[in-house]
Amino acid sequence: MATTPRIPAELLDNYFIQMERDDDNDNPVAAIAIPVELSRLAAIPVRTKKSFQLDPVLHELIRLYNAKVQDCQYCQNARHAVAVQAGLDEDMVSALSHFETSSLKDDVKAALRITAAVSTNPGLVSDEMWEQALRYFSEDELVDIVLLSMHTTASKVTITLGLDPGKEASSRLFFPTEDVYGSSPELAEAIEELRSRGVAVDGPADAPLPVGATITPSSGVA
């Protein structure tokens, strides 16, 4: 897996994996960065009025599955604090590489089958697979699962060009108030609702994570 850029250094000026869109930026590499707006709506497991309406644990498992498949070191090392507080644990993460034979719940397996197909060949999403998933999810939720599965394969381009920042560049726990996710009235409203329920949204100092849910800082990946 390449973390050494394979493109001219002058193209990397001010580049990062997630960026605000700027119509005046004519750097072609900036065009492949993940827009902050898209990350706010899709990449964090916080349900707002305009975001994906998925369970935060399932949301994070889909993200981490694709991080493993694409071998994105940055993404594999990260955990979203909201999902951790909702019950995500490292046994679940370890099970992603063999989810079919794991002890993950049947609804998670049904979703991951779709994610696995989307990550390799969308034509593999069969009618049978779709019908099985409908036992656990609404049609709107299945659309969100497909869109999230598609969004989280976006690192393919970054990795191919050698622009994965690497595991050392990622925080072990990300919180929804961090600058990388930008801001919007919908996100602010969702954050306040989480805070009112005692969910830590600003970092470990804001509120302790539940016992058993804390992710120990590590330089390794799952």
Image (cartoon, grey):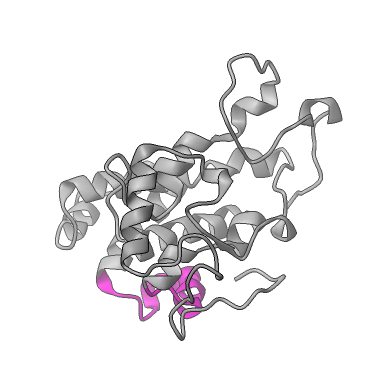
- Point 43% across, 80% down: residue: 210
Q: Nearer the viewer, residue 220 or 153?
A: 220
Q: Which quarter of the figure is the C terminus placed in?
A: bottom right
Secondary structure mainly formed by the magenta segment: helix
- Expressed as whole percent of the image width and height from the top left, the position of residue 87 reads 38, 75
Which residue is pictured at 62% across the width and 65% down the height?
Answer: 172
Please tell me which residue lies in front, 187 or 55.
187
- Residue 91 appears at what percent x and percent y? 47, 80
Q: Is 128 in the magenta?
A: no
> Can see residue 152?
yes
Q: How many numbered callouts? A: 0
Residue 135 lies left or right of residue 24; in this view the side is left
Residue 16's place in the image compared with 103, above or below, is above
**Residue 159 % position (x, y):** 67, 44
Residue 71 location, quadrant: bottom right
Residue at point 35%, 76% (across, down): 104
Q: Which image quarter: residue 68?
A: bottom right
Magenta segment includes 105: yes
Image vertical order of residue 22 relative to residue 177, above or below: above
Residue in view at x 39 percent, y 51 percent:
117
> Would you say residue 121 is visible in this rendering?
no
Residue 208 vertical placement versus 116 (above, below): below
Image position, residue 217 (x, y; %): 65, 74
Out of 138 and 207, give the one closest to the viewer.
207
**Residues rendered magenta in the picture:** 87-106
Q: Residue furthest bottom?
A: 211
Q: Is residue 158 left or right of residue 143?
A: right
